[in-house]
Image (spheres, helix red, strand yellow):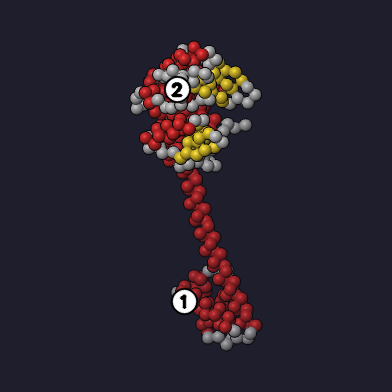
Amino acid sequence: MAESFSAELKKELCNIKAEKSCCVKAQAYGMLLFGRHFSSRAISLHTENTMVAARYRELTQEVSGVLPRITSGSQVLECGVPEESYRRRVLSVFGLTGLELTRRINRANLENECCAGAFLRGSFLSCGSMMNPQKDYHLEFLVPRQRLSEDLAALLGELELSPKTAMRGGARVVYFKESERIEDLLTLMSAVKKSLELMDIKIYKDMRNRVNRLTNCETYNITKTVKAAVTQLEAIDRLEKDGRLRGLPEELYRIALIRRENPEASISELAALSGETISRSGINHRLKKLVRIAEEG
Ligand SMILES: [Zn+2]
């Protein structure tokens, strides 16, 4: 089975190794903070993605020396730190005691300007997902805590990526629907491949929409022309049946015969067939007059 767009994106993000230690710390912080638990009572991440689980372990160890354990449940992998002393060690790296009442983004852990992208990369790996842009533009962070989701929305807002927020089954969703914003966010997280892919899909979609609009417009015009021709042919038939056709003024009689012989001809073609120097609107005028006379009975 083909990997989902989200899984491919996470794979790309997992393979990015930040160079600066400040960014490594920021990404680890993002992953840990947006995991299932992040306090002295429990530190854990639940995920179905083995690469994400491996990255969580790797980053946690890199910044704290503590290597989380992975246990596999029926559906998900659980990465956690079972010993309290080790949990305290991890938390202390980020200036936390583990007794904080609410989970918030502590900006002190985003030391430099370069760190925001790394932090968001970590957050996305833990709680983000993205739909295949072929189907729909949608990228979201599913955040378990209210205050944390507000902090995330505020941070994204400062980066001029103002997201939307909603509730879903007790959790907060911080999400994006505009392709440009999603593209900016992917770029910020250094997901170069997926960002380019999104751009390509958008160009292709826009072009397809334009083609569809043109085709619809053409179809509309053709339908209109065909309808008009049918009305004219019916009028001519009626005049014939009523015995009034031959009695029409010469120019109307002539155009009626030409139309009857050429039911599918366009107005320009009828003008050419008439052998007269007459404009399209002249022909149109005569045809309308035929229809009117027929209707008047
Ligand atoms: Zn940095």
Please say if 141 is above or below 212.
Answer: above
Residue located at (39% from left, 36% from top):
157
Please say if 159 is above or below 14.
Answer: below
Q: What element does badge 2 sit on?
A: loop
Write down the residue under mark 1: 282
Q: Position of residue 240 (x, y in %)?
A: 62, 82
Q: For the N terminus, give its image quadrant.
A: top right
> Marks 2 and 1: which is nearer the front?
2
Q: Quadrant of residue 154?
A: top left
Query: Neighbour class for label 1 at 10 Å: few (<14), some, many (≥20)?
Result: few
Residue 51 visible, this orientation: no
| Residue 238's disc number | none
Q: What element does badge 1 sit on?
A: helix
Mark 2 / mark 1, whichever is N-terminal: 2
- Horizontal side, residue 10 vs residue 25: left or right: right
- Horizontal side, residue 21 vs residue 205: left or right: left
Q: Residue 291 versus residue 158: which sits nearer the camera?
A: 158
Q: Are marks 2 and 1 in contact (CB under 8 Å)?
A: no
Amino acid on which disc 2 is placed: Glu
Residue located at (44% from left, 17% from top):
97
Q: Position of residue 261 (x, y in %)?
A: 59, 74
Write down the residue under mark 2: 100
Q: For the C terminus, give its image quadrant.
A: bottom right
Mark 2–mark 1 distance (CA, rounded to whole Å): 85 Å
Q: Position of residue 130 (x, y in %)?
A: 52, 35
Residue 88 visible, this orientation: yes
Please say if 163 is above or below 224.
Answer: above
Q: Position of residue 16 (x, y in %)?
A: 45, 24
Q: Quadrant of residue 199?
A: top left
On whether ligand 1 comes within 8 Å of the CB at mark 2, the answer is no
Residue located at (62% from left, 78% from top):
237
